[in-house]
Amino acid sequence: MTSLPLSANRAALLDQQAADSRPIWLVTPETLANGQFPQTVLNWAKANAYKGKAGQLLTLANEQGQISGALFGIEPADKDKSGEGRLIGGKLARLLPAGNWHIEGKADHAELFAVSFLLGGYQFNRYKKDASAEDQNSVSLYISGLSDLAETRRLADASAMTRDLINTPTSDMGPDALELAARNLADAYGAKFTAVIGDDLLKQNFPMIHAVGRASDTAPRLIDFTWGKDSDPKVTLVGKGVCFDTGGLDIKAASGMLLMKKDMGGAANVLGLARMIMDAKLPVRLRVLIPAVENSISGNAFRPSDILTSRQGQTVEIGNTDAEGRLVLADALTLADEENPDLIIDMATLTGAARVALGPDLPPFYSHDEAFAAKVAEQAAAQSDPLWRMPLWAPYEAKLASKVADTNNVTTDGFAGSVTAALFLSRFVKNAKVWGHFDIYGWTPVEKSAATVGGAAQGIRALYQVIKQRYA
């Protein structure tokens, strides 16, 4: 979609092989030793002591000393236990010299290889004065056997948009800018867009969104857009849009704030997922709800021990102002639940406990629905888009008890933080047929095959496939 500009991507996929295209042979140590390759290729590999290790590129030269082809090591299928090896095309995007290329023969898992190639070429360089024009769309690749090139580009473009939103600093991605990004997306697909801003949140009964965001100079807001036919199944996406989190009066340490521009990662991811759904014209009535706030500090900031009344009517004692994401989500989930949707998915950079349990690369998810959870797990594996189910362990709900309100927003012992956060949110979903909560990190701390360090699209390729299959 040309109306939604993305950051630079040095990788592009071709619809057909270019006349000046150079071949790439995908190899493993075993196939390099035993496979059918031109003798000149084998001689070159031997002369350069190239063994075909996964992720290693060897360029070939012709008699004039010009680059004439390449060998690229891939992960043998029997050694790819995590599925990460199927995304190794992302490394290829960063290693290939500029020009037109094609895969010689057939690539295993061609669709995933192609998606990863585009994901790996992503570059967030809009703040760099000397960003090289050479890096923009400089490597073009043709892969035979792709069943749906438009789908491949759809997944990559939506993921790039998600990463752009997270990577943008809060000075340019506060609640107002996040609203504008959502509005631009909605307008691009003809969705109906509204936003409830500032004190209107109180008038329209979103008191916890207002309380969390009122200390910021930029007014809090609830972003709301709908797309699709009213007669189609209702699918609602809710994303945590905390554009920066100081921790509030329970202030974070300086080190804890360094990545807090990513605390709107849930919002960014649901916008990416929404883009996939709308671009594919899936037969659903889509609604996107994003409570967009800054958790700032000023004289009117909400306080520890305050008691807030939620949209649903439950009262919430504030045990910690740094557990603000679940408060804004609670009001948004209540609104989502009021129209009895078939499916609610919420995504949020909600708890550090999730990272302690599963690390940054494996987001936990929660659902009461066994069939939905099984489909999510299935597609997470199939798409190499990791997600791991965690339990909504009912006995832990007692940890959220309050002596003065219906519930507390945190526990007192610090145990099972991701589970108890999910249990807190579950109190605000009563009518939806299926609900899934995804506690994502939203950031790649160490470079991976298809992801450079920075904002991360997590789980949305898998969720798109779940939704696509559910409403096919």
Image (cartoon, helix red, strand yellow):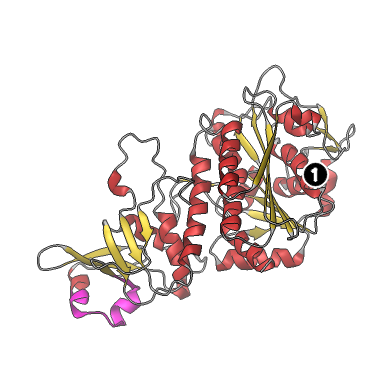
Left or right of 126: which side holds 205?
right
In percent of width and height, residue 186 lies at 60, 46
Q: Amino acid at mark 1?
A: Thr
Magenta part of the chain: 24-43
Q: Residues within 10 Å of mark 1 (few under 14, many from 20)?
A: many
**Which residue is pictured at 51% across the width and 29% down the height?**
171
Q: Quadrant of residue 59?
A: bottom left
Instruction: Say if 133 sits above or below 370 in the image.
Output: above
- In this rendered view, identify the residue nearer to me: 467 or 385: 467
- In this rendered view, identify the residue nearer to me: 72 or 391: 72
In percent of width and height, residue 465 lies at 61, 64
Left or right of 211: which side holds 94?
left
Q: Residue furthest top?
A: 299
In percent of width and height, residue 238 lies at 69, 47
Residue at the spot of label 1: 334
Instruction: Say if 242 sits above or below 347 in the image.
Output: above
Q: Quadrant of residue 469?
A: bottom right
- In this rendered view, identify the residue nearer to me: 41 or 115: 115
* Residue 41 highlighted magenta (yes or no): yes
Instruction: Say if 140 sits above or below 422 in the image.
Output: below
Instruction: Say if 346 sits above or below 256 in the image.
Output: below
SS for tag 1? helix
* Residue 40 highlighted magenta (yes or no): yes
**Which residue is pictured at 79% across the width and 31% down the height?**
207
**Can residue 318 be seen?**
no
Image quarter where the C terminus lies is bottom right
**Can residue 121 be seen?**
yes
**Which residue is pictured at 33% across the width and 74% down the height?**
29
Left or right of 314: which side holds 434?
left
Left or right of 153: which side holds 52?
left
Q: Residue furthest left?
A: 64
In percent of width and height, residue 343 lies at 74, 57
